[in-house]
Image (spheres, helix red, strand yellow):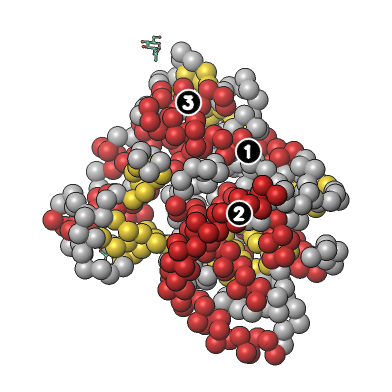
Amino acid sequence: MLSILIFVLVRKQKTAPLTHKQKKFSMAAKLRWLPRLLLILSAFFLVGQTAVLSSTESHQRYIKHASGVHPVVLLPGNTCSQIEVRLTDAYEPLSPLCAARKGDGRWSLLWKNNSAPDAEVPCFADQLRLVYDHAAGDYRNAPGVETRALSFGSTRGFLADNAADKELCTGKLVEALEREGYRDGETLFGAPYDFRHAPAPAGQANRELHLFRRRLRALVEYASRVNGDMPVILVSHSQGGYFALDFLRRSPLPWRRRFIKHYVMASTGAGGFVLSMQRLATSIASSSASYSSPSPADVLSMPSVGRTFASTFTALPSPVAFGEDTPLVVTRNKSYAARDMPAFLAAAGLPPYAVRLYETRALPVALNLGAPVVPVTCVNGVGVPTPEMLVYRGGHGNAPEVVYGDGDGVVNLASILALDEVIGGDPRQEYYKSVRIANMSHLGVVSDPIALQRLIGEILGAARAVDTRVM
Ligand SMILES: *[C@@H]1O[C@H](CO)[C@@H](O)[C@H](O)[C@H]1NC(C)=O
Ligand SMILES: *[C@@H]1O[C@H](CO)[C@@H](O)[C@H](O)[C@H]1NC(C)=O
Ligand SMILES: *[C@@H]1O[C@H](CO)[C@@H](O)[C@H](O)[C@H]1NC(C)=O
């Protein structure tokens, strides 16, 4: 029996050189960002200090037996990054307890801090929520709250120390890569990101993603430099795929060709998934009553927190993958297809400005998802029952009847198949391969031994591929 379905599409075509206008724009952008770039670079070196230092130390040792390894840079899935917080004097605490570290200038762990007492969870919730700043046209933290993703540059930050996180946050994949000789900080690097945020259309303010792209660009260049200038293999899981695609598509094409050998995207579809609608409806339905005494690990699922994230909208089913009229959510009075998402969000209780943000910020990104124009291998699980339609007979508040279809348990098959068109179908995309592993779940792709063997095979295969591109 065929346990692995492979769909390969290889296309060769010359890419158009940058137009004069594009060149002019990037130069203007460079000049405008120069002062901030310096600031950002210094931030990168501060935050990434541990990883960069250990890499520098091992540099000599590595170079001795450098046989030309393509370094791997890994972006994990949702919730995997540790997020630290620092409270300035501008912070208005909910209670005296939440004010404990206000103004002391010290960073402490906000997300993935499981040692925090339950009593502090409301403080954590207040500090993790995002607000949309209408004047700036951007999402930001609550006033007085400063955050950062921990251990940029290393995979250690998102592995944490519990077994569940290891499966969820590519710990097994890191172990498998280490068995192949990869070493954290030498040939293997991690790019944790603030998963509360999301890519926005070009031209819209998005400070967090802008910072992330700068830091990732510096990391990729560093990884290449300490590995004999070999281009990098970028690997992402789940939500990391949205950040990686945004990063690649906004990097200058000559840069991509110079620094990216291959992009391996695991468990990300091209059109979102129905389960994200269920999560939204559930988070709205469950009033604060069901969270009377939440533990630190529950903080993200509290409606006052999760609903405020820009990333809440990222994986909503898009018309790219789901038919214009295919009902995804059915209530007694109405049925909602992908194009009815604004009405669904309103019915689910989101405020009008949030629905507007979906329409003007999240949806355009979903509709414009496209080819990264570097060699790509997509790896997805299929054959696992996956929510395809939600039937709410008792209104949004009650648990829905779930109609299951094909997919990886999270991402619907339609969304996985849409990759062939969205990425593979782009005439500028030279190499595209889609690997669909039968009976494999969303997490299984980066944790199941069979899937890992396949995934590692793709990564090592990409590393071995002869580079015929002209640099
Ligand atoms: C997938 O799982 C089903 C049910 O367990 C089984 O019948 C089928 O043979 C499996 N398919 C493959 C390709 O392993
Ligand atoms: C976790 O939270 C507690 C309570 O706020 C704090 O005392 C502790 O320092 C935090 N842990 C880390 C590693 O920052
Ligand atoms: C849906 O229909 C019920 C009666 O069947 C009605 O009471 C309710 O107000 C309707 N809801 C909406 C949002 O129209």
Are dots 3 and 1 in contact, CB under 8 Å? no
Which residue sits at x=49%, y=15%? 334
Q: Which residue is mark 1?
A: 368
In the image: residue 120, left or right of residue 407: left
Residue 34 spot, x, y in % from top left? 50, 63
N-term mark: 3 or 1: 3
Q: Nearer the viewer, residue 357 or 318?
A: 357
Which residue occupies the extreme left position in the image?
Answer: 96
Lower sequence index among marks 2 and 1: 2
Q: Is residue 142 above or below residue 281?
A: below
Q: CA distance from mark 2 to mark 1?
A: 21 Å
Seen at 58% across and 64% down, the residue is: 217
Residue 222 position in % (x across, y down)? 60, 73
**333 and 429: which is toward the camera:** 429
Q: Which residue is mark 2?
A: 26
Residue linked to disc 3: 342
Earlier residue among tags 3 and 2: 2
Give the residue type that dot 2 points to. Answer: Ser
Please state which amino acid type lies under the numbered disc 1: Asn
In the rendered structure, which amino acid carries the disc numbered 3?
A: Pro
Q: Give 149 or 139, whichever is nearer the viewer.
A: 139
